[in-house]
Image: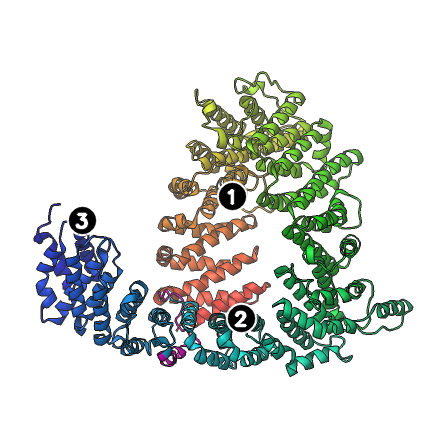
Amino acid sequence: MVRVPPGEWVPHVEAYVDVSRPAAQHSASVDALAALVNKDNLTLFDLVSKMDMYLTTTDHIVRSRGILLLGEILSRISFKCLDVNTITTLSDFFISRLSDWQAIRGALVGCLALLHRKQGVGCIVIADVKRLVESFLQNVPVQSLAAADRKLCFEILSCILDRYPEAVKQMDGEQLYGICEAIDEEKDPECLMLSFHVVEVVMKLFPDSSGLAAQFAGDVFEILSKYFPVYFTHGVGNGLDATREDLSRALMHAFCSTQYFEPFVIPLLLDKLSSSLPLAKIDSLKYLDNCIRFYGADRMVRHASAVWYKLKEVIFDLSSDQLLISEAVNCLKTAIMYTDSSDKDLFINLILLDEDIVNKIRSVSSVEKSILSSSEDLAQLHALGSVISILAESSTYFCTRVLQEHFVHLVDIVGTKADYESQQLNNCNGSSSAPVNYGALYLSVQLLSSCREVAYKDCSSVKLAKESWWLILEKKLEQLIHLLRSFFTVTSRSMQPLFRQEYVSCAVKGLLTLATFPEQCSPLPANAYEDILLMFTSIVINKFENVDLWRLSLKALTSIGSSIAEFHASEREVVYYRTVVDKIVPLVESYDTSMPLSLRLEASYEVGTAGLNYMLRVAKSLEVAVVTNISESEANGRMECAEHVARLFECYSSQVLPWLLTSGGVNELALSFALRLLDETKDLTVLDRISSQGLLDSLMTGMKLLVGVCTEEQQSLIVQKAYSIISSMLSLPMKLMTGRLLAVDELVPSHSVPETALISMFSSIIVGLRPQTPVPDMMVMINLFTVFLLNGKIPAAYALASIFNKYLHSPEFSRENQLDKILDDILERCFSTVLANSSSKISHSSAGTSDDVDSSDVFSGNKLSKINILSSLAWIGKGLLMRGDEKVKDISMFLLKILCSDEILASIPFHQEEPYSGNSSDTSLAISAASAFHVMMSDSEMCLNKKFHARIKPLYKQRFFSILMPIFLSKIKETTAVTTKLAVYRAFGHIISNAPVPAVITEAHQILLVMVDSLAKLSLDIEDKDLVYSLLLVFSGMLMDEKGKECILDNIQITISVLTELVSYPHMMVVRETALQCLVAFSTLPHSKIYPMRRKVVQAAIKALDDKKRAVRQAAVRCRQTWQSFA
């Protein structure tokens, strides 16, 4: 390799050593020298030889820069192979420099670079690492250094401990003390992260009872304890990598690094549980949970009593928030599981014999506490239930002990069968009934849940013990089931309405728990299991007026079904299918029923989610319901059937299909449904009725989704069947269509409603096809859709757009570039149709009075057709745009021509009172052309998306925006007519609002003023409110970007003026709110720029304080406070 002469690289050394040079030049010099060394254009020997004076000079500034340069170069050549002599020489040099406090940074960088080198490329030897440790601890005063240098020190220690532990295993007490001294009083977050890790690794290196960890545990922990709990005052965006959570986690790992910390850690954590700071309590519980797991039973048994009492205080403290209680409960669960000893009754006796627990259970059993009287009672009961249930579910032994102590007594307190028969009789006679003891009921159900958890863990030996919990539960089972079921038939007048839901919810949970025991060890007989299912099913079918009970029962049925699938309970699955699925799912098939359709759909879907077989049954029932309703609408002529079918399809498409797609088994189902729909709609009479009743849109949406999820082979079957139906039903010259696109005079001028509906259904099939699915007689298909497109039928445009998006350059048509020529022909016909007879309104309006009505209708129909053709062009353009075809430019230029045509725009009112849409006869072509750009740029659910397998070229929106931006800016600048400029603003607004914000920000310097002017002009028309909001969101994105801020600063007065006007925008609340939020964001800009606008902004904010919407008033308050704070 050719060596570079010194004259070419020495200047880099001189530039780095010169402290007066900028930091960027220093960095560039290091990179250049490291690159030369890596490429062997410069050897380290030559480099060090030429740098000798910089490395040994008495000028400490030059010396420190020279040593730092060598260290930085070494860190950048970590993958370059170096021989042993070179590594040894460098090690000797940098280790010796650790005593040079004036050049300490370079020495630290060099040592760290040597430690990071890997085996195979030349690394530091263990003997040198030991020398490095000794020199470091002897010569480097860590806490006297700057934060950046201290971080290097801790990185060195961390690297040595992680990668070279054998170098420090012979460490003596003095060296460990040196590490402690380096850590003590550290306050920098990033340094603390490293120092906590250093402590963790050091203590793990000496596990023996006679080792350094045991000897110095107290001294080391005294340093660590100062940092608990971690308080982190650094703000967001300060460039630090460490967060409070990271620091706290690192400290926790240090606490758990050695068992010898246990005598110091546990008392500290328990003491902090008495702190008034919630953060200290939360951290104490998290640390305590981890420490219990790590220290083990032998060490934790001595703290069992103290841990229980402290956790009890937190759990039963009404002032504790839910997060704190949840952490305490989790910690108690860990303590019970891990604090095991030779006396296994130790912890359970602590809890069961605890005076407070005994008194609370006795209080629950008393008559005075038989019903809930306050939310405080409920909170205390929940706390007691969590403690008892956690204890019971810890093991089979614990579960048996708890049930022996309390279960039988609690169930008897709730009531006996005779009690409830008497209570039901009293209610029927109108007399008062005895109160239901909710506390006993709740605790009984909690213990049931604990039994189930134990059964999940150890089902095999559950019945073997003579006094096992299973036998206790079995003895009281019949009584308990009767008690729980009684809550659904007996209305206790003693239940306060506020807490009645608690009783019912608890009863549902109890029955659900019994029904979800593992089948092989369930105490529930088969007939009782079926009775529970029948009861919940009856509630779902008959008691839907009680929404709370209805949803609880439905959720219970779903959970039971899920447990069957989870544990593969085959016998129960048969019962569940017969009892639940076969009774609830068919509800969607019936039209005349008292239960609302929304609840029937919800019930069927929720039951279906319990398993794949159940959901397939739901899908089949929805299919039957759709087909049945189509047939019945034909027979009965019900107009309300359209909404019914639409909701059925909505459930099928938005819930059932997505669920099945994630679980499998959807393809054959979708194929069957699609073919069945084709069978139902192959009669023109049926299609006529479907169209008249408004069912067509729902069927089209459903067909697209069904076809979209099918495989290519299945799609081919569907499209072939649809094509055969069309061939037999349409009165079109099908034979003429096979070889070419029909001439204009050969096209059928108009079509009946059924024929249009048939083509619409067929277009939905084409939209959902995969690009690889073959289409029979493509020319016939294109001819068909072109005929209907030129008659203004939008669904035909969806189909053509999908065809040209997916098949334009297909090998089938590549020989003569056939589809390209057909596309050109279709576009030409659309262009000529839109431009033809542009003055027809004038000629018709000057005709005789006898034909006034007919002339108006003719013109309206003509114009509506043109508007639909413009919309169709937009969809075709969208398909071409998404696949990256250049012909989209032809469509864009034509739309721009329509926008800027003075002849057409002459009739456009500046302020329209009626809403405009594609179906209004007086909708202007210019507005339709502007909306076309929205179609092309926006994401669509109708077609051309991933769900329907469209070809999507990456970054197509960015490219389209970049192409059109200069054209639109030129047109806006040239246009003088107000109506024309407004139309162009609309189109450009659609492009900007749908383009990716980063792409817009890139061109912010060109488009900002145009966008602000667009906001001002478009805000005058209510019909542009959505576009105004979209543009405002783009502007807010600019305001959050640094480059965008620079452009806004240059035009700050006009932007703030427009925003203050939008603060009172009457047509949309979110526009006013967003405008105020943008004004608040302006406060981060330089004070000198924004202060002159202070008065105007404050006045606008004060005016918004009286807004009708609360969100706007809140934003106005923030805006006023922010801007009034400027001095």
Q: What residue type is disc 2 on?
A: Tyr
Kindly report which numbered mark, 2 or 1, lies closer to the viewer in this rendering. 2
Looking at the picture, tell me which residue is in the foreground, 27 or 987: 27
Spot the residue most to the right: 429
Looking at the image, is 163 positioned above or below residue 670? below
The quarter of the picture where residue 16 lies is bottom left
Looking at the picture, tell me which residue is in the foreground, 77 or 824: 77
Marks 3 and 1, how far apart at CA: 50 Å
Find disc 1 in the rendering and name its residue: 939
Residue 545, x across and y down, in percent: 78, 57
Kindly report which numbered mark, 2 or 3, lies closer to the viewer in this rendering. 2
**Is the residue under label 1 in contact with that under label 2 (CB below 8 Å)?**
no
Q: Secondary structure at mark 3?
A: loop
Point out which mark residue 338 bears: 2
Please state if 957 lies on the left or on the right of 74 as rendered: right
Q: What residue type is disc 3 on?
A: Lys
Local packing at callout 1 (Cα closer than 10 Å; few below 14, some 14-19, many 20+) is few
